[in-house]
Image (cartoon, rainbow, N blue to C red):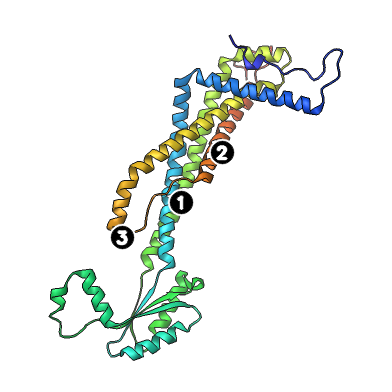
Amino acid sequence: MATDPLLRRPKPARAVGRKAPLLPEAAGIYLAHHRQVAKDSAQRLWRAPLASLMTWLVMGVALALPVGLLLVLSSVQGVSAGWDSSARITVYLADQVTLEQARRLRADVAARANIQEVVLVDRDTALQEFRTGSGLDEALAYLDENPLPHSLLVTPDESARTAAAVELLADSLGAMGEAARVQIDLDWLQRLSAITRLLERVVWVLALLLGGAVILVIGNTIRLAIENRRDEILVAKLVGGTDGFVRRPFLYTGLWYGLGGGLVALLLLGLALWWLSGPVERLADLYRSQFELSGLGLEGVLALLGCAMLLGWLGAWLAVKRHLDAIEPGVPAGSG
């Protein structure tokens, strides 16, 4: 039977009849002991697969839920940002404005400093686009004249794409004598942006709560492990084991729990994205949108695994600090 890692002490720094090891040798002994403790901690989890799997599943669900919601929000924000950057102000000109006057007006508006681009859509082109998009060719053929006016599609400069700047620009364009009506399609974009900002905060609150729950789960699991190995801890401390030496296996156990929970979260996210990708693509096609669910890149995967291991280590450290330090030779069980 393998010796428990708590009872495997590293070789002493000084032995009888020989000099203390050099710094590289001492560092090698220290790292070798860390590797051995990490290996023993992983094997201990592997020998209890059901309990370990249950803990990993709880951690995976708690980590995958906020990360998945953040992925959805980031995709929505990316699409809405693209819509916002291409938002235009439509200026419908009066019916009596001729095509030549509309061209001169387009040049005058394009010369403004806060304008990026101005596109003139004459009434014939507008009627043709309406026929193509509406499918009312036969009904429109009975019209005696074209009822659509010339229009200007004005794209503000990047520095003038705030809500206040766009409204000010629209008022300025509407004050022109040739303008009959000015239309801005920013209201629903602003509502969408406000909703996404609210949901983003909700997701972060949910992530903090679930992160706290992960720490509590790991802490309770490590507490049970400490109680089950109380006699081993007492023996290790009786033979001179330091607090750092005794707590090391439990901290590595927390890291392994965190790594396993992070891998389970990645698996759940992959399955969820695969399951939702088809319906999302069909819905985006119906609305002629470029929306798509994007997964975690390499940096996101590493960040998720790092956060999971950090939560596991933190939960183990809190449990060790609370329960392990109270176990001392001569102190009755439960007095801490």
The residue that mark 3 highlights is 288
Residue 331 at x, y = what percent?
Answer: 66, 14
Amino acid at the residue labelled 2: Gly
- Which disc is residue 306 wearing? 2
Residue 112 at x, y = what percent?
Answer: 48, 83
Residue 218 at x, y = what percent?
Answer: 53, 28
Assign the C terminus to one quadrant of the image. top right
In the picture, residue 128 is in which quadrant? bottom left
Name of the residue lying farthest toward the top: 1
Q: Residues within 10 Å of mark 1 (few under 14, many from 20)?
A: some
The residue that mark 1 highlights is 200
Amino acid at the residue labelled 3: Arg
Q: Earlier in the sequence, mark 3 or mark 1?
A: 1
Identify the residue at image location x=21%, y=73%.
Answer: 131
Query: Is 336 on the left-hand or right-hand side of 218?
Result: right
Amino acid at the residue labelled 1: Glu
Q: Secondary structure at mark 1?
A: helix
